[in-house]
Image (tube, rainbow, N blue to C red):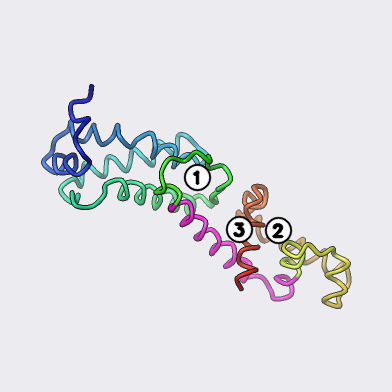
Amino acid sequence: MRPLLHHNDSTIVRLIRQGDKKAFDELYHRYVDRLLGFSDAFLGDTDEAEEVVQVLFVAIWEKRTQLNPSKKIESYLFTAVKNAILNRIRDTKKRCDLTSIPHTTQASQEDILQHICQKELTEQVMGSIQEMPEVQQKVFLLSRIEGLSNSEIAKKLQVSKRTIEHHLYLGNKFFKNKNFDKVFVSGLFFTIISLWWTMS
């Protein structure tokens, strides 16, 4: 049995601040599996997930005197992992595939961070759409959101069908260059811009 198993998180943090390695090991065992699961669900790469979590725990030990026992260490851990995940997503041009997150995610903390990630992804997607030329934006959204055919869009915008096909081709190419193609495949794109479309 782990010697500090029955100590609460606040006590564990106080001991870690004093340099107690057993307390640090206890904190690690309490949260490592959930942090790994959360990280892997977003990154889709077990090795990357392990690296994110290991780097976090190394940083905790190195900066242990800065820990605040009066604040929830669970919230601190998951927020730190969330920030590390978002940084990696930006750095590697990956995107959150929220559809891969298990429905059995344990705590509301993970659910909250999932919404945060989705919000950031929504902002990234819509920011990219707004970089398109105005006509291309209209064609893209009429096709993707309203589900209009190329002929219907051509009639609505009073341009040729071939022009519509060209704008859609450029729009798809634009999103591929922005590395949002994974979002299209996952079906998350439709959810994101549908929500934005109804709110705008």
Residue 139: which quarter of the image?
Answer: bottom right
Q: Quick one: SS at disc 3?
A: loop
Question: Is residue 90 placed above or below 54 in the rendered structure?
Answer: below
Q: In the rendered view, does 167 fall on the left or right side of 190?
A: right
Q: CA distance from mark 1 to mark 2?
A: 25 Å
Give the quadrant of the C terminus.
bottom right
Q: Which mark is residue 178?
A: 3
Q: Are marks 3 and 1 in contact (CB under 8 Å)?
A: no
Q: In the rendered view, does 22 fall on the left or right side of 163?
A: left
Predominant SS along the magenta part: helix
* 3 or 2: tag closer to the N-terminus: 2
> Which residue carries the number 1 mark?
42
**The residue stretch that appears in magenta:** 112-138
> Which residue carries the number 2 mark?
173
Q: Position of residue 1 (x, y in %)?
A: 23, 21
Q: Position of residue 21 (x, y in %)?
A: 17, 33
* Picture mark count: 3
Nearer to me, 120 or 70 = 70
Residue at the spot 47% in from the left edge and 34% down from the top edge: 46
